[in-house]
């Protein structure tokens, strides 16, 4: 999932920060949210409230006019984890050291993104994830704190969602042509066989057995991961578990960059990573940003839903960015862990606002896979401290 900078606007794949937008004409779709009605506005008649989910305790974000005369906005675009990352900071750049400070901040952000990418990339041979994927079943590997932290979040959300978030569905994702696969099926005959998908899914179901540990010595703390001692046989090959932490890794990076904003003393701006995860501080004039959620069925990516956001992180998932069609059926990169196949839940997009962006990244994937009823109950019972929106066909 994947930006063009304006002073107070950002155009991205699934969300948009803007000062004014208009709707578009589409078939009718349902919006399901735990936000109280005065927290948001539906701006496209194609979307109607399908249900309001009770239990939200997240605070409403209000606009507050700020007196920051002399402030302006600087931006930088980076490329990391195969997507664009957009950094925007507002400050009084007329002050002598302000631009130098922003340059230092930008360099620090870029360095941190590279560090995270080198730890989590499944395509960099020296990364922790690549070493895990290449290791034999049951192997113990030393990993960086970055990988340890991301795996800790992944395991936590895996348990919270009863396995609906599962980063071990690596082979399933690859089999359907996603996750950097060299090609994808073009006809029904080219789709992976059910018996193979069942084996891949069985292998992924052991993700809960991934074990993390740490030890301390005179040189500091060492971190380790132990791979599940389980394999499957496919086409005469013995396969051990492989992971893809790309999605949750972007959310983790957003959490880290959000903390760096605070370390550098920046109150105003945002960081948008690949349109799937964002850290939003304050707008230097309005306090809150206007956040528009993009219609996942709009070729023009028009927003259909508006809310305000300030000093929060969010993540979003959708079936509209990485997808193809065979015989009129949509196949997307989000895998249902109960079937091992691309989701058929009717959920088109999901956004979670609040808390950790890494958690939100994993949670939106899980919500997409759960389906409307299970997702609504999960949000009501487990996500009362966050603002959640998902759309259904």
Image (spheres, rainbow, N blue to C red):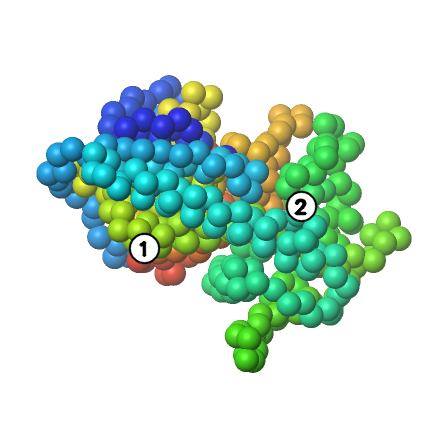
Residue visible at 62% across and 29% down? Answer: 324
Give the mark nearest the N terminus, 2 or 1. 2
Q: Nearer the viewer, mark 2 or mark 1?
A: 1
Is residue 261 placed above or below 182 in the rendered structure?
Answer: below
Seen in the image, is 341 located left or right of residue 273?
right
Q: Residue at x 47, y 44 (%)?
A: 110
Q: Look at the image and tell me whether residue 194 can be seen.
A: yes
Residue that protrudes farthest toward the right in the picture: 236
Whether tag 2 and tag 1 are in contact, CB under 8 A, the answer is no
Tell me the crowding category of disc 2: few under 14, some 14 to 19, or many 20 or more residues within 10 angstroms, Cα based.
Answer: some
Quadrant of residue 75 within the rendered picture: top left
Residue 305: percent from left, percent from top: 31, 33
Q: Position of residue 143 (x, y in %)?
A: 61, 64
Q: Is residue 136 left or right of residue 374?
A: right
For label 2, the SS is loop
**Rendering coords of residue 235 (x, y %):** 86, 49
Q: Residue at x 83, y 58 (%)?
A: 238
Residues 74 and 228: in front is 74
Task: Kindly state the secondary structure of the residue where label 1 is placed.
Answer: helix
User: Between residues 80 and 101, which one lies in front from this camera angle?
Assistant: 101
In the picture of the structure, the residue carrying the numbered disc 2 is: 123
Disc 2 versus disc 1: distance between alpha carbons?
A: 31 Å
Q: Could you say where residue 11 lies in the image, as x and y percent from the top left?
A: 38, 28
Q: State the residue position of label 1.
A: 263
Using the image, determine if residue 337 lies above or below residue 32.
Answer: below
Determine the residue located farthest toward the front in the rendered image: 96
Using the image as rendered, state which of residue 202 and residue 264 is in the foreground: 264
Which residue is located at x 31 percent, y 33 percent? 74
Q: Quadrant of residue 209?
A: bottom right
Image check: 145 left or right of 66? right
């Amino acid at each position: 999932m994947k930006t063009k900078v304006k002073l107070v606007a950002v155009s991205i794949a699934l969300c948009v920060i803007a000062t004014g937008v208009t709707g578009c004409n589409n078939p009718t779709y349902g919006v399901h949210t735990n936000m109280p009605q005065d927290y948001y506005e539906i701006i496209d008649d194609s979307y109607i409230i399908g249900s309001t989910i009770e239990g939200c305790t997240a605070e409403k974000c209000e606009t507050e006019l700020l007196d920051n005369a002399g402030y302006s906005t600087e931006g930088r675009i980076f490329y990391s984890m195969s997507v664009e990352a957009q950094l925007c900071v507002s400050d009084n750049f007329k002050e002598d050291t302000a631009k130098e400070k922003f340059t230092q901040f930008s360099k620090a952000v870029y360095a941190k993104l590279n560090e995270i990418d080198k730890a989590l990339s499944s395509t960099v041979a020296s990364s922790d994830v690549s070493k895990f994927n290449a290791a034999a079943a049951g192997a113990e590997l030393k990993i960086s704190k970055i990988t340890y932290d991301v795996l800790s979040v992944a395991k936590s959300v895996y348990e919270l969602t009863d396995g609906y978030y599962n980063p071990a569905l690596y082979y399933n994702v690859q089999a359907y042509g996603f996750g950097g696969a060299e090609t994808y099926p073009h006809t029904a005959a080219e789709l992976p066989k059910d018996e193979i998908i069942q084996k891949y899914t069985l292998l992924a179901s052991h993700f809960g057995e991934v074990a993390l540990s740490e030890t301390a010595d005179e040189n500091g703390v060492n971190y380790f991961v132990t791979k599940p001692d389980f394999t499957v046989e496919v086409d005469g090959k013995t396969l051990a578990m492989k992971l893809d932490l790309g999605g949750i890794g972007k959310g983790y990076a957003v959490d880290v960059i959000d903390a760096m904003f605070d370390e550098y003393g920046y109150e105003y701006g945002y960081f948008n990573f690949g349109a799937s995860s964002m850290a939003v501080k304050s707008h230097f004039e309005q306090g809150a940003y206007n956040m528009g959620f993009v219609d996942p069925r709009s070729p023009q990516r028009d927003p259909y839903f508006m809310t305000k956001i300030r000093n929060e992180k969010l993540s979003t998932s959708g079936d509209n960015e990485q997808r193809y069609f065979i015989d009129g059926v949509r196949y997307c990169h989000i895998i249902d862990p109960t079937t091992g196949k691309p989701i058929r839940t009717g959920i088109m997009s999901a956004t979670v606002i609040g808390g950790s962006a890494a958690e939100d990244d994993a949670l939106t994937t899980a919500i997409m896979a759960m389906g409307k009823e299970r997702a609504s109950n999960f949000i009501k019972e487990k996500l009362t401290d966050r603002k959640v929106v998902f759309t259904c066909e």
